[in-house]
Image (cartoon, rainbow, N blue to C red):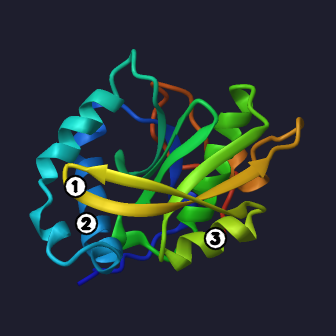
Amino acid sequence: MIDDKAIDAADITFRPAEPSDAALIAKYHHRCWQLAFKDLVAPGVVEKMDPWAKFNRWRRWLEPDSEFSTHVANLNGNPIGHVTVAGNELVHLFIDPDYWGQGLGRSLLALGEQMLADAGHQGIQLHTMVGNGPAIKLYESAGWMLTDQLVHNDHGGVVYDEHLLLKQLDRATSYPDHLSARVLPASAPATSAAATDTSASPA
């Protein structure tokens, strides 16, 4: 069961993830698998997944020398969603199920694209699980192209296929207006941007 929690977009900021965020990210990441992907993999697979494995992975991903770069959607100091990039790939985009359907997906997607643009990439890619219709709809609405290529995954017995999506970024890519004042630098106070932005993007 999802406990929907309405939020005001002005209360959300976006900041670089910190190692102390690992436990909360791993917790909602596991819930996303339980609620969104359970029916997209073999019966019983999600129930057997070890949430601690996600915690250990997130501890590695959030280390200072990691190849992964992650920003979180921040509410009252806590992460409620994240986007992760590495190389020219948008690796992860997950939102705490309690906050689904309130525009965070679209905002985090735009942020991830900007992170890739800032790193100098124009041709970018992402993978999303076959059957994940809501995610595919979001990506296509943001200009991503769904290809015929599938990527096969087998992570410790968790077996699934993903679509490859591609997008070409404009050289002048910059933060959308609804995000620009709410993206905080590393170690900045996680305060509200209510004075500068009150809009919410649909997702």
Residue shown at 23% from the left, 84% from the top: 1
Q: Amino acid at mark 1?
A: Lys
Element on which disc 2 rests: helix
Who is closer to the viewer here, 11 or 65?
Answer: 65
Whichever of labels 2 and 3 marks the residue nearer the N terminus, that label is 2
Disc 2: which residue: 31
> Dividing the image into 4 quarters, which one contains the C terminus?
bottom right
Residue at 35% from the left image edge and 75% from the top image edge: 36
Horizontal side, residue 70 vs residue 20: left or right: right
The answer to whether residue 83 is seen in the rendering is: yes
Residue 76 location in percent, x, y?
37, 51
Q: Which residue is mark 1?
A: 27
Secondary structure beneath disc 1? helix
Picture coordinates of residue 58, whole percent (x, y): 28, 37
Query: Which numbered marker is on residue 138?
Result: 3
Judge the density around disc 3: few (<14), some (14-19), many (≥20) Cα neighbours within 10 Å: some
